[in-house]
Image: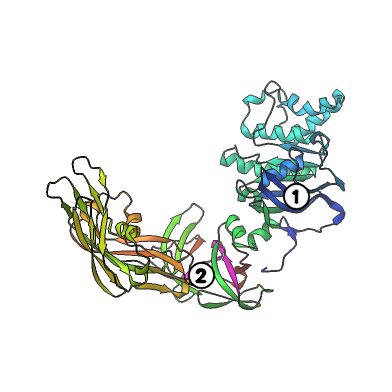
Amino acid sequence: MGKHTAHVLGGKAMEINETNRLIQFQNIVKDFDGQLVLKGISLDIYENEFVTLLGPSGCGKTTLLRILAGFLRQSEGRLIFDGKEISDLPPYKRELNTVFQKYALFPHMNVYENIAFGLKIKKMSKDVIEQKVMKMLKLINLEGFEKRDVTLLSGGQQQRIAIARALVNEPKVLLLDEPLAALDLKLRKEMQYELKRIQQEVGITFIYVTHDQEEALTMSDKIVVMKDGEIQQVGSPIDIYNEPQNRYVANFIGESNIIPGVMLCDYQVQFDDQDFTCVDFGFKEKEAVDVVIRPEDLDIVKEHEGKLNGVVKSVLFKGVHYEIMVETVPGTKVSVKMHVTKPHDVASSDAKERISANSFYVDLADIKELNDAEIIARADAQAWDPMTNEYLSISRIEYELKEEVGNYPVTFATANGTSITVNIMAVEQKYVENPKKNEAISAFNFFKSVDEIKESVAIDTDLKTWANAQGWKLSDESDVEIEDVEYDFDPDTIEVGVYEVSFATKGRVFKVHTTHNSEEGAEIALDFRPEDIHVMSKMGY
């Protein structure tokens, strides 16, 4: 836990004997046209292990499998199989077989002939072939299917035949590249158990590639989590799930609540301004860490009877359990005034030009950065020909600004002299800090016409833009997303007036999986045990 590692595989103790080491990837690098796909992979795989390479599309897991199979050659590094370097060995001389996502069965051959194909290539006698094929049919629970047309079988049956065709050659290793991806959910779950059973019965090493976390947790003795051509963590399903080494692994394996914290000392961690006893050790004192608490490890109790008080934000029934979202720290919120005016534009004396602009607010600290282009954009100033609706250039802009609070007129004009004057209102912009969430948020009061609001096709986005709403981390000023925009008007029927608009970041929300229901808006508390807290190094994620 924390920085110590349990040596458990597949939920049971397993002694790692170096003499059983079958495959060694030693600093494997692969690049395609200068793009690094594998960035120095080093990994040991042992006899009779069910190993899963797990990661999203593009992480390099299939590339690693294809290098082992001999279909690709690494750019750098060594590949050791049973004590021998095999990098230059062709695929057909390697003691392994591959099962692909597309089963690649021979449609003109029946079940028996498909399974026997490799044995016939080796020129084995008919009676030996028959014995081996019948043994395989029994192993995959398809006895009596030998004369069947493979094209008329179900996806699960075809997959089992593809596995039997590979296993009948008695390889030391079976490689499986997302073999269940084409199956429906129910059949995929059935085949997960079937594959694990087959692996245990034949007693050889299986190396399985998937992006499905449940498949990896269900079948594997060892999981290798990959991201961007690098290994993030290697361990048993129990280790990977209960003791993720970083935020990426915690997010990718199962569902997680991840909270920034500080490791005060061994067995003591702080988050949400509270100190908690945990079971982790080996970190530096006051080291910044990430804390993981799984949804199923949280209990909802009466308010003030748990460790964190919160409010139920949503309840979703998922069949076996309820998924309840509980907010323990509110998001950071700022409110501004939106001044809605009548459409105001000015026409030239001959009515051949029109020009419009809005007054706007600016922070004193931003006045130095204002230029003509910025002022035109903030005022949404525009000129056009009312007959053709073609936009005209604003050729002149006049203003005089001081770095003092006040209203400053600004005039926009076309080349023909059609002009409009509005105000730049310089203010000391207030912002809201939320130290508990290490963030702040700011926004400006703003002016808009009725027509501009009615014509908006993405009102939440436009409101954020018009108000120049921004959120940032107090620690490093990195951006924080504004997730909620609240207002009490209907954009389609809005009238002239002053309206309050609020912008907020997402609060600290814990996901809870429980068999007990709760009501939205209920004030509750969350409880958990020291062993439910899992502390991880930041590691840049």
Q: Please check the rendered image and state whether residue 14 is part of the magenta-colored stretch, yes or no.
A: no
Query: Quarter of the image holding residue 86?
Result: top right
Q: Quadrant of the N terminus?
A: bottom right
Count neighbours of disc 2 (C-alpha within 10 A) and say few if under 14, some if 14 to 19, many if 20 or more: few
Query: Compared with residue 386, is residue 288 higher up or lower down, i.e. above or below?
Result: below
On the picture, is 156 further left or further right than 86? left
The residue pinned by badge 2 equals: 476
The residue shown at (29%, 75%) is: 404
Query: What is the number of the mark on residue 272?
Result: none
The residue shown at (71%, 68%) is: 4
The answer to whether residue 116 is visible is no
User: What type is the residue that disc 1 sits on?
Assistant: Ile
User: What type is the residue that disc 2 sits on?
Assistant: Asp
Tag 1 or tag 2, which sits nearer the N-term? 1
Residue extending farthest top: 108
**SS assignment for the magenta stretch, majority:** strand
Count neighbours of disc 1 (C-alpha within 10 A) and say few if under 14, some if 14 to 19, many if 20 or more: many
Determine whether label 2 and label 1 are within 8 Å by CB.
Answer: no
The residue pinned by badge 1 equals: 28
Q: Position of residue 497 (x, y in %)?
A: 19, 62
Query: Quarter of the image holding residue 103?
Result: top right
Q: Position of residue 420 (x, y in %)?
A: 19, 57
Q: Which span is picked out in magenta?
A: 287-303
